[in-house]
Image: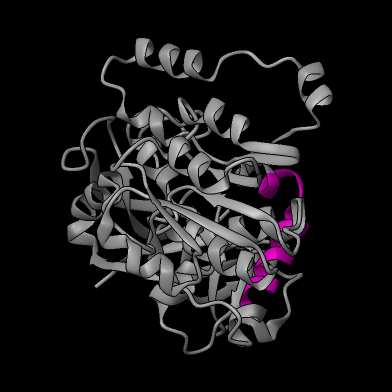
């Protein structure tokens, strides 16, 4: 099979953002069948990239590897089963790793035409917006009147979740860790802002809810927040787990991982049944692997909602490839809002 010469930012070792990446040549296969070759303008950052860099993401390929789930660029070649008119289209696209590269091969159905939409905005409508849509609209739709807690509410997923929840007529509790983010989540429709740095977020919520309970919690943190959220949701409530960012704060390797699991504890299914509570786990990589048609549907719907003006992507920062370490450190710090993108210049 003919190979295409490209280049990429390889993850070469675990550790800090400053020492983990190297720019190297990359050989990739030409597209076949339903695949397309995309010449990329930019790629997006996701917290899974940070987890992979820290050696905490079990799905990541062995080192050295190219991480990254999404790109914006132009289709320059296509497999025989792809409509010829697709060539030349400017798209946002999912990829199963490999996003930190100048060229990416992915399935045609994993792309969405964006025309002249700025890449940094389109990127916010890919992994994070699709994750939010899958959880809030496809997996277990929010209903009018639901009381919804959104952790990391000012982030890429959180900002879209707020907008989707308000479209459904829900009451939104936006959890943040920096008061500078309060205005943003309020502008998107959050009814209550919970700053967990001020005091325990569960106590703040209990004070607001009084004898009531949450209907949904969207939680990418896990660890110590798991039991708190489970106690906060009421009958018929859903705790949606889609990450474990608390794990990245551990400094003691395997011991930190055991402590992370210990904080979550053991859960007997009969207990959930008796209390009529639900725990939903979300790993979009598994959805991409086993239900690619679902991922394609969610991307199509997110782009539609944006075209109709129903949701607005939040751009948190734009970096060049030379500043990849700075971009990673910014995302890892928890001080950013919206979506971070990295451009090939």
In-image side of 288 versus 72 (left or right): right
Where residue 323 sits: x, y (%)? 18, 58
Percent across and percent down for residue 332 are 29, 44
Q: Is residue 178 left or right of residue 322?
A: right
Q: Main secondary structure of the magenta part?
A: helix
- Relative to 87, is 7 on the left or the right? left
Query: Is 103 above or below relative to 326?
Result: below
Residue 106: x %, y % from top left: 59, 60
- Whether residue 309 is visible to the viewer of this picture, yes or no, is yes
Quadrant that contains the C terminus: bottom left
| Residue 66 seen by the camera | no
**Number of numbered discs on residues:** 0
Residue beneath the point at 76% across and 49% down: 291
Q: Which residues are magenta?
A: 287-303
Q: Give the colouring mode of the picture.
A: one colour
Assess whether residue 297 is covered by the magenta stretch: yes
Which residue is at the front of the view, 255 or 190? 190
Residue 101 falls inside the magenta stretch: no
The picture places residue 178, in percent across and down from the top left corner, at 27, 52
In the rendered view, tell whether residue 59 sits above or below residue 194: above
The relative height of residue 297 versus residue 306 in the rendered view (above or below) is above
Identified at 57% across, 41% down, the residue is 242
Q: Splitting the image into 4 quarters, where does residue 319 fall?
A: bottom left
Q: Is residue 153 left or right of residue 108?
A: left
Quadrant in which residue 338 is drawn: bottom left
Q: Nearer the viewer, residue 23 or 136?
A: 136
Residue at 51%, 48% (x, y): give it. Answer: 208
Name which residue lies at 25% across and 45% down.
Answer: 333
């Amino acid at each position: 099979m003919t190979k295409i010469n490209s280049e990429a930012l390889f993850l070469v070792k675990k550790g800090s953002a400053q020492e983990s990446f190297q720019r190297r040549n990359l050989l990739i296969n030409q597209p076949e069948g339903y695949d397309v070759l995309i010449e990329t303008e930019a790629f997006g950052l996701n917290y899974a990239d940070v987890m992979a860099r820290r050696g905490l993401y079990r799905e990541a390929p062995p080192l050295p590897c190219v991480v990254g789930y999404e790109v914006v660029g132009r289709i320059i070649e296509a497999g025989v089963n792809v409509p010829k008119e697709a060539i030349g289209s400017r798209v946002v696209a999912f990829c199963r790793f490999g996003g930190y590269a100048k060229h990416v091969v992915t399935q045609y159905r994993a792309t969405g035409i964006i025309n002249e939409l700025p890449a940094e905005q389109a990127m916010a409508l890919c992994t994070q917006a699709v994750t939010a849509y899958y959880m809030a609209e496809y997996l277990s739709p929010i209903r009018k009147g639901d009381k919804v807690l959104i952790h990391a509410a000012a982030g890429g997923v959180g900002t879209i979740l707020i907008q989707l929840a308000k479209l459904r007529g829900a009451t939104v509790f936006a959890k943040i860790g920096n008061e500078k983010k309060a205005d943003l989540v309020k502008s998107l429709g959050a009814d209550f802002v919970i700053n967990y740095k001020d005091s325990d977020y569960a106590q703040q919520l209990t004070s607001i809810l009084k004898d009531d309970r949450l209907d949904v919690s969207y939680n990418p943190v896990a660890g110590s927040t798991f039991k708190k959220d489970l106690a906060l949701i009421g009958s018929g409530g859903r705790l949606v787990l889609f990450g474990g960012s608390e794990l990245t704060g551990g400094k003691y390797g395997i011991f930190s991982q055991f402590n992370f699991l210990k904080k979550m504890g053991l859960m007997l299914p009969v207990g959930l049944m008796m209390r009529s509570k639900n725990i939903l786990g979300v790993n979009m990589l598994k959805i991409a692997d086993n239900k690619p048609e679902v991922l394609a549907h969610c991307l199509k719907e997110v782009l539609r909602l944006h075209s109709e003006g129903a949701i607005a992507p939040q751009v948190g920062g734009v970096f060049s490839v030379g500043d990849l370490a700075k971009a990673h450190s910014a995302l890892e710090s928890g001080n950013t809002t919206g979506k971070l993108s990295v451009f090939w210049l």
